[in-house]
Amino acid sequence: MQATIWHLPTDPAPHLLTGQTDAGIMRDVIIALLFPAAAGLYFFGGWVLVMCSVGVGSAVLIEAGYQRMVGKKVTVSDFSAAVTGLLVALSLPVTAPLWSIILGNAFAIVVVKQLPGGIGRNVLNPAVAARVMLKVFFEPRITQWVTPGPDAVSTATPLEHIGYFTRTVSPELPPLSDLFWGCMGGSIGETSKFIVLFGFAYLVWRRVIDLRVPTMAVLGTAIVIFLYSGFNLTFTAYHVLSGTLIFAAVYMVTDYSSGPLTIQARIVFAFMVGGITAAVRILFQLPGGIGVAILIMNLLSGVLDRYATPRVIGHPKRETHKDLRSLRQPKPDGNNGKSGPINADGKSCVKLRVINASFKILTHTRKAILPLS
């Protein structure tokens, strides 16, 4: 009896597909961002709608214009530019001039995102990089905080009273409830932590983000501050509810393209972002800190992936780029002068030869068994 051998063509991995697409994920992020945007509209008035519209519109136009100019395919339909523009607008106070949103979007889209090759190839988070850039070069213009309401009274961020080697709660600070519900001035998106939690719940429900990642970012800051303050829970709570920590933990730390690939690495990434944020707040006169922390960890994402990637079955260690390169490049064998694959230690790759011999044995066994079937 002659056996029939089927040749089944296979496409490159991945072979397990889900219903998620880039555009679908970005749409979910935009929906989640509507919660803090709506809260900002309630607290600061209609000008928030103008800022958000300018943010989204300018980001889309800048990306489409740049891609047409360099002859690339226009990819604004994936909504990633819209997400960047909305994040940049919500990361600024309502007093920020419109040109700062446009300038931030130009830096985020062209310099951070498109020059490295587009979405998925950018090392840094575009919106975070834009926010840090604006804060470094235009701080007086984009840090004029005002209290919510029609009076719009100028106010200082609470972090100015609890940062830079401070360990006690200042009497000038508002109640913690004001920080949670949104009765303090700040950036548009960070005003109400209560509303941000709705966006967080939506993204978790849609399985766009992992529950552990934002949680570990906040927990990293809380643990460092708690230990530094001598186990002062009130002081720690003020740090958690002040600034952009919760907003950034939900919408920026969870960014796919600039963060690690594996969930283990993303959890470590988020925790270290939180820890660095606390360190920046303590050691420097830089109230926020989480933007700098995210950019630092963006640069270390590859290192985290390298050590968090599961070991391949049958390999005693994770292969490095040097090991793989040495296996692909034949070099003279020191024993007999013939060319053969050399490993990182300079010895012949006995393991590969054993594997090849095993495949030959299996092939001959299969040929011997098939005629008997």
Image: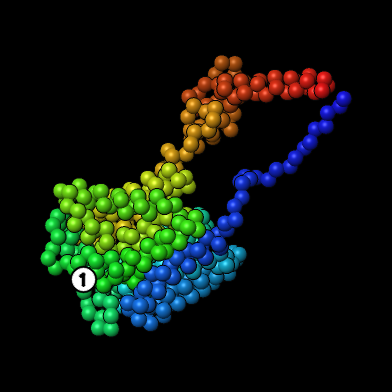
- Residue receiving disc 1: 156
Q: Residue 60, percent across and down?
A: 51, 71
Looking at the image, which residue sits at the far right?
A: 1
Which residue is drawn at the image coordinates 19% and 66% (left, top)?
175
Q: How many marks?
A: 1
Residue name at image x 75 percent, y 40 percent: 8
Q: Residue furthest top?
A: 335
Say above or below: 124 vs 37.
above
Residue 61 screen position, x and y as percent: 51, 73
Confirm whether residue 107 shows in the render.
no
- Residue drawn at x 48%, y 67% is 31
Looking at the rendered structure, the kind of residue marked 1 is Ala
Q: Could you say which is closer to the camera, residue 298 or residue 67?
A: 298
Give me the residue at 24% from left, 69% from top.
178
Q: Could you tell me if residue 266 is visible in this image?
A: yes
Percent position of residue 369, x then y: 78, 20
Which corner quadrant holds the C terminus? top right
Crowding at label 1, few (<14), some or many (≥20) Cα neighbours within 10 Å?
A: some
Identify the secondary structure beneath mark 1: loop
Q: Where is residue 341? Give x, y as percent.
A: 58, 26
| Horizontal side, residue 257 vs residue 274: left or right | right
